[in-house]
Image (spheres, helix red, strand yellow):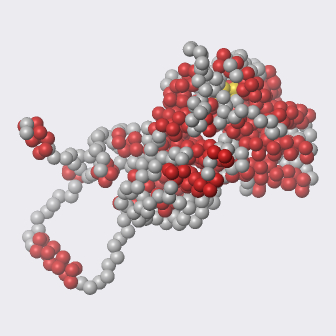
Amino acid sequence: MSDADTLARQRKRSKAGCLTCRERRKKCDETHSNEHDGACQRCIQGAWKCQWPIPPTQQPVRVFERGARTKAREGRSTSRSASVDTVAPPLPEAAVPNSTTAVPAFTATPAALAPKQAGPAVTQIDGLAPSSSQICPPASQPSSPQRSSFAHLDSIRPGFHSLGSLGRIAEHANLEVTFQAVDQELYAFFYDAYFCSLSGPLRKIAVQAIKQTVTSTEVGRNAAMATCMLYRLHVLQNTPSSLVDINGMKHEEDELRARADEYFQVALDQLSRQPIPLAVKLQALMDLYSHQFVRVGAQAAQFLLLLYEIFIQELGPDPILDLQTIQDPNQLLLTVFGWEDVMICLILRRRPSFRILGLPGEPRFAGSTELIDEVNSYVSVIPQLGVIPVGLMLCVAAAANLAAPQSSLPSEVVACKAEAIEKAIRSWRPPLATSDQLADSATYLEYLASTEMYRHAILIYLYQTVWKHGPLSAIIAASLQQILRIGARYVSGTVRRDPDFTALHDPTSGGPSTANSPGVTAPVQIPDALMHAMRAVPFFLAGTAAIMPADRRLCLQGLRAAGSEPGWSDNIKALERIWEVQQADGWLRDWRDVLEQEDMHIAFL
């Protein structure tokens, strides 16, 4: 044996690492990050609360006391001779034994869904009882110093119940997440369709940035796995009955739902405990929002939007969303989140969290009395997301900004701004089609039709929120008819080939389509489920202005085409309740006021 081997065997373990890595039996890098309260890099990447031992210089000084050892020995013998029953104090949460049972990533085969073997006994966390299939946000759990970021939501949280399967993952501190290649491919396929309007290189950068953000931390992987379990459930439910075992299909669906709930609860718990980069927080919230919308409903999804508004405050007051210069992937992700934040204003009474320069209705330059009244010349790195082009997104942001503070503005100012915004909406033109879009003419025409539905929906939003017009307004009635005439062809039952997520699991399909010619980017098709979900917002806004029974039935068909999950069901119930209140009162009120009075919620994917 060489001298080097002898020295290696005699080398002692370092005791300068953090207590968290020591308890997890991981090697600590012993670094102190200034941006995360002195946490080590391993705890930052795993979203753990990093705790360091007390330095020797700060420990109390040991003082010699004559006879202390004898007194201690006598005290131990006295305690052993006493016949008093003692109860061990409960372990603190951080001291709960780590689970050795990992949650495996599911495959589409029934063999992977066999019942799990009984694992070690688990301990219930925070007194949550397995009473229902819904979740309990951290704000409704007993207060804890590690959950201070949710403490001020007590007054606004919805009345959730605890997760039914929480006992299975009570020892979730060491839940292992295997983000397998098939799940990463499924996850990337969804965002590849979402970024279909981007050029090939930029689309690849965007998908890679989201993939890297998701896989960089445990909270990101848990949130992504919660979404992937629901994607797999969607694939299973849309598989022809001739290709699956009917008896085992029900058991497989239940297992996928249970696993999705488990991953969600762990991700939400980690999100509330650890200092996490903002991009990771927002991406995890998007995945958790999708889970709550599909599994619980609109109210639970809206709760996560409140968390989004809290997290976005880390950027400071009134952050600017720059759409014209994107320098790094993190800024690209923030642009995507800011884009979605603007579109939420169509259904919720709020203004955008970001400030966007160059909106219609604003002065063309400082000190100018001329207002911007067109958006066709606006240059953006991202021309559109989904079916929403940048020009219409700017119009939504401008209308939402005007609707919020209009009570404090002179009526003449409101009228001038609203006229400029309306002119920008009416004069908007779709950008020139790219070669990728023209490669699939049917999908491109469907995209144009969906975009026109949004343009008329934004006109309805502008007249409802700013001008305070009702359904009898000629402008609103005309936009309503345009939405229904365009959308009717997509809810009439016409069948077309659905490039859905099942292509990733069909061995004969070869996965998503690839280019046949070198140098040509393959066209990215948007799945039918995603297209129906995107068209649900125009159908809902049209429904709030619909009076005739035939028009209302068509709006309901458009919402039902998006899906049958709890979130979509809540939207349909809210729309039907709006009609009931209007019919009972005999006069029309703002549908947002009706939902607030009835304590009903809506949300969209």
- Depth check: give the residue in front, 152 or 565: 565
Q: Looking at the image, which residue is at 34% across and 76% down?
A: 87
User: Residue at left 78%, top 26%?
Assistant: 425
Regarding residue 269, the answer to whether it shows in the image is yes
Relative to 584, say whether 442 is above or below: above
Q: Identify the image quadrant of residue 509.
A: top right
Nearer to the camera, 489 or 306: 489
Q: Quadrant of the C terminus?
A: top right
Residue at the spot x=81%, y=53% of the render?
577
Q: Quadrant of the N terminus?
A: top left
Query: In the rendering, at what x and y percent does residue 126 appear?
Result: 47, 63
Residue 564 picture location, percent across and down: 72, 49
Q: Position of residue 449 (x, y in %)?
A: 78, 28
Q: Is residue 118 above or below residue 24?
A: below
334 displayed left or right of 43: right
- The answer to whether residue 458 is seen in the rendering is no
Camera-nearest residue between 224 and 496: 496
Looking at the image, residue 302 lies above or below residue 80? above
